[in-house]
Amino acid sequence: MKDEGDLAKLPEMADLWQETLNWQPDANQLAQLQSFYELILESNRQLNLTRITEPSEFWEKHLWDSLRGILRLLSSHHPSPFQAIDIGTGAGIPGVPIAIVRPDWTVTLLDSTRKKINFVQRAVEALKLENIKTAVDRVEQIGHDRHHREHYDLALIRAVATASVCAEYTLPLLKVGGVAILYRGQWTTDEAQGLALAVEQLGGKIEATEAFVTPLTQSTRHCIYLRKVAPTPPTFPRTIGIPTQDPL
């Protein structure tokens, strides 16, 4: 039987990182990812941050999955400053792992739940991540805030709502030319058609849909990449609750 120390140790998976992403974290990044995992375990009983706590499962479903979404951006160079936002960040996923491996980016973590952002702020301080900002707010509101609207180069959204709702949440926040990444599990033709109609109304286009298999459990996942090609009409995002009640 494993003791508590074993349970809290993430697998390094150097070969799998390299084989699947053509990249691997350096020693400092590995240490930060391990510390982030431990911080989540410590707070999970009180805050119910995630049901995924076993080390290999956490590595695959939270860390690897987060970074697979930005595969094409993992090692690329961007003009500084590069601004990203993680919408509905929860425990800080995918935003914190991404901020760890891209210290040259500024990553804003947004959630409407104060206790989750309080946890993320403690984690950011413990990890000494100076490239992270946090915000407690509804995305429908910050989408009309001049400090956020059309401010970001990259918007990330994972397990929040249907794809068309995710498009309405993300595209108003992007600069023209920016990209939204929708992290999804299964993906159907009907979902793709519905998303295409929504994106067209929001000043975007579907640039790519990538299907991939996770390296440990062989689960099928998808990432949908939306490119903003024109300003989003000022009526979007609609007021709180409307996008989910009446999707585009």
Image (tube, rainbow, N blue to C red):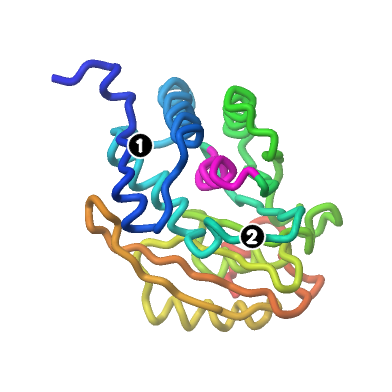
Where's residue 15, x and y in %? Answer: 29, 48
The quadrant in which the N terminus is found is top left
Q: Give the image quarter of residue 132.
A: top right
Q: Residue at x 59, y 32 (%)?
A: 120
In the rendered structure, are the residues bearing label 2 and label 1 in contact, judged by CB atoms less than 8 Å apart? no
Residue lying at 58% horizontally and 27% vertically, measured from the top left: 127
Residue situated in front as seen by the camera: 61 or 138: 61
Residue 98 forms part of the magenta stretch: yes
- Toward the viewer: 2 or 200? 2
Q: Residue at x 71, y 79 (%)?
A: 229
Q: Which residue is mark 1?
A: 51
- Can residue 132 be seen by looking at this rendering? yes
136 relative position to 67: left or right: right
- Give, as a three-letter code, the residue at label 2: His
As helix, strand or loop, the secondary structure at mark 2 comes to loop
* Image position, residue 238 (x, y; %): 72, 65
Which mark is nearer the camera, 2 or 1? Answer: 2
**Mark 2 → mark 1, Cα distance in angstroms:** 35 Å
Residue 134: in sight, yes or no?
Answer: no
Query: Which residue has dot 2 on it?
Result: 77
Quadrant position of the C terminus in the picture:
bottom right
> What amino acid type is highlighted by mark number 1?
Arg
Q: Magenta segment: does it hold 29? A: no
Q: Which residues are magenta?
A: 92-103
